[in-house]
Image: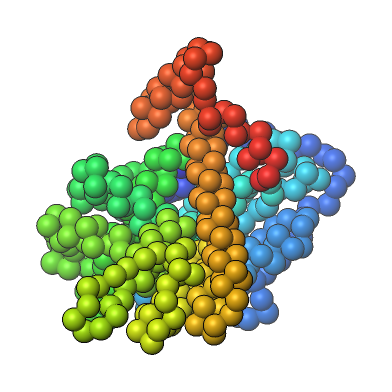
């Protein structure tokens, strides 16, 4: 997100999203409403520096739990101690909060306090990106513990902007799951289209764009740059030396442990397949099913190899070789279902049931019926998924566009052209026809 500097403190960190100074410059109205409670993370002496203010106790609890989880996750990687050195205060604005009338968006600022600094952040309780914004503050405070390990006093000359955006965002992204493997998909398309950013471009980013598509694109590459530095134990040691070099008098030594442009290009070329080791995305599941749906067999060693798809199993002879080939497909589909996208589980179960019925010698009509159900459900799922993709793409290019230049300007040009074509009765627009249906289902 783009940064808007809030000039209310001796220091203003350039890595946050800010609002106009007028939001805090005004005096608070005397409403007679007592200030909302400040809640500490826990009774532990290790966490008094992290606090949350809100009239919503649950929001405070979730925020403070996020602080604890963030530190627990980054402590082994960054080799941190148990105590927060830099205080972080999160103020979550609920409708009954007096400040809600003045502040309607995320804001953050940094205040120097002699031997330390503190982050003050505020956001509405309705903010859809609340978790991302709050987690960003915690990650930044933890990185300060590394960057300013040898700094004991802070003033207006403290170089807060020396913490690169890619490191904050990459570490933050690394803390969050990506079950749909969107990061892999973004990188894969960029590599295939030869639009992936160079290492110099990424390390030169000073902000994450407000543009939703461009922001996702930037965060994906920030994630992979950080991931390339910390994949293995050996690289984690290099990462520690790189961090130590940045906080030392001679930071040039840190570059010895940083990837070259060639290393980066190889990294993004290899990164797109990593998600397969965990859970398949929707498209990956479809691709794996297509690769596993062919049954190959031969009546004897000298016989010609024959093959058929899962949908034609009911027509096969039930001899030993065919039964062994079908059993092998059952095993493959069982393994695949353990990693498949949830939308495909019912389809894979129907295929497995049909193959099992064939092996067990059940009524051929039952086998055929189960195969027909699986095939039908597969087609329904593919049609629905395509409608969903059409809807998301349509929404992005028609509803989520703000005035000004965009990295994805071609999308908006395409949308306008589609609207022009739609006005012609001779050209039917299937995307627009599905919009109301998809919205009602969502």
Q: How many marks?
A: 0
Residue at 22% from the left image edge and 78% from the top image edge: 303
Residue at 30% from the left image edge and 60% from the top image edge: 272
Q: Residue furthest bottom?
A: 320
Q: Is residue 215 above or below residue 187?
A: above
In the image, residue 54 lies at what x, y percent? Answer: 73, 56
Q: Is residue 51 left or right of residue 339?
A: right
The quadrant in which residue 441 appears is: top right
- Asked whether residue 81 is in view, the answer is no
In the image, residue 74 lies at what x, y percent? Answer: 43, 72
- Colour scheme of this structure image? rainbow
Q: Nearer the viewer, residue 222 or 255?
A: 222
Q: Is residue 43 above or below residue 250?
A: below
Residue at 63% from the left image edge and 46% from the top image edge: 127
Q: Nearer the viewer, residue 88 or 227?
A: 227
In the image, residue 93 lies at what x, y percent? Answer: 71, 48
Q: Nearer the viewer, residue 76 or 356?
A: 356
Quarter of the image with the C terminus in it: top right
The quadrant in which residue 79 appears is: bottom left
Q: Is residue 322 above or below residue 106?
A: below
Residue at 52% from the left image edge and 25% from the top image edge: 429
Q: Residue furthest top?
A: 424
- Asked whether residue 259 is in view, the answer is yes
Q: Is residue 246 left or right of residue 280?
A: left
Q: Is residue 373 above or below residue 45?
A: above
In the image, residue 211 lies at what x, y percent? Answer: 45, 36
């Amino acid at each position: 997100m783009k940064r808007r500097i809030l000039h209310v403190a001796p220091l203003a960190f350039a890595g946050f999203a800010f609002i106009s100074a007028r939001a805090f410059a005004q005096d608070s109205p005397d409403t007679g409403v007592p200030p909302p409670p400040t809640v500490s993370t826990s009774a532990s002496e290790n966490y008094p520096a992290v606090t949350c203010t809100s009239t919503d106790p649950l929001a405070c609890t979730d925020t403070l739990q996020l602080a604890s989880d963030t530190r627990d996750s980054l402590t082994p990687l960054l080799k941190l101690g148990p105590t927060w050195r830099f205080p972080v205060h999160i103020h979550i604005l609920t409708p009954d909060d007096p400040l809600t009338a003045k502040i309607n968006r995320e804001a953050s600022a940094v205040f120097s306090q002699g031997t330390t600094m503190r982050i003050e952040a505020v956001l509405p309780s309705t903010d859809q990106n609340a978790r991302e914004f709050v987690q960003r503050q915690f990650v930044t405070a933890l990185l300060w513990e590394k960057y300013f390990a040898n700094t004991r006093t802070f003033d207006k000359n403290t170089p807060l902007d020396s913490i690169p955006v890619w490191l904050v965002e990459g570490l933050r992204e690394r803390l969050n799951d990506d079950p749909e493997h969107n990061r892999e998909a973004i990188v894969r398309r960029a590599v295939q289209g030869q639009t992936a950013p160079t290492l110099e471009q990424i390390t030169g980013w000073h902000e994450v764009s407000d543009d939703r598509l461009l922001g996702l694109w930037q965060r994906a590459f920030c994630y992979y740059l950080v991931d390339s530095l910390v994949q293995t134990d050996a690289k984690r040691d290099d990462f520690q030396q790189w961090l130590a070099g940045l906080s030392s008098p001679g930071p040039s030594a840190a570059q010895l442990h940083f990837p070259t442009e060639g290393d980066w290009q190889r990294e993004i070329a290899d990164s797109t397949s990593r998600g397969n080791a965990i859970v398949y995305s929707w498209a990956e599941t479809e691709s794996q099913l297509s690769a596993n749906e062919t049954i190959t067999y031969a009546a004897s060693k000298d016989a010609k190899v024959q093959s058929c798809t899962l949908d034609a199993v009911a027509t096969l002879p039930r001899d030993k070789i065919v039964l062994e080939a079908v059993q092998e497909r059952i095993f493959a589909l069982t393994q695949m279902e353990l990693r498949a996208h949830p939308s495909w589980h019912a389809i894979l179960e129907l295929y497995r049931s049909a193959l099992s019925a064939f092996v067990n010698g059940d009524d051929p009509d039952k086998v055929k019926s189960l195969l027909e159900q699986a095939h039908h459900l597969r087609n329904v799922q593919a049609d629905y998924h395509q409608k969903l993709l059409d809807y998301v793409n349509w929404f992005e290019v028609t509803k989520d566009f703000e005035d000004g230049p965009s990295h994805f300007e071609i999308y908006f040009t395409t949308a306008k052209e589609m609207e022009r074509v739609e006005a012609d009765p001779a050209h039917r627009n299937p995307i627009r026809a599905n919009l109301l249906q998809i919205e009602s289902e969502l």
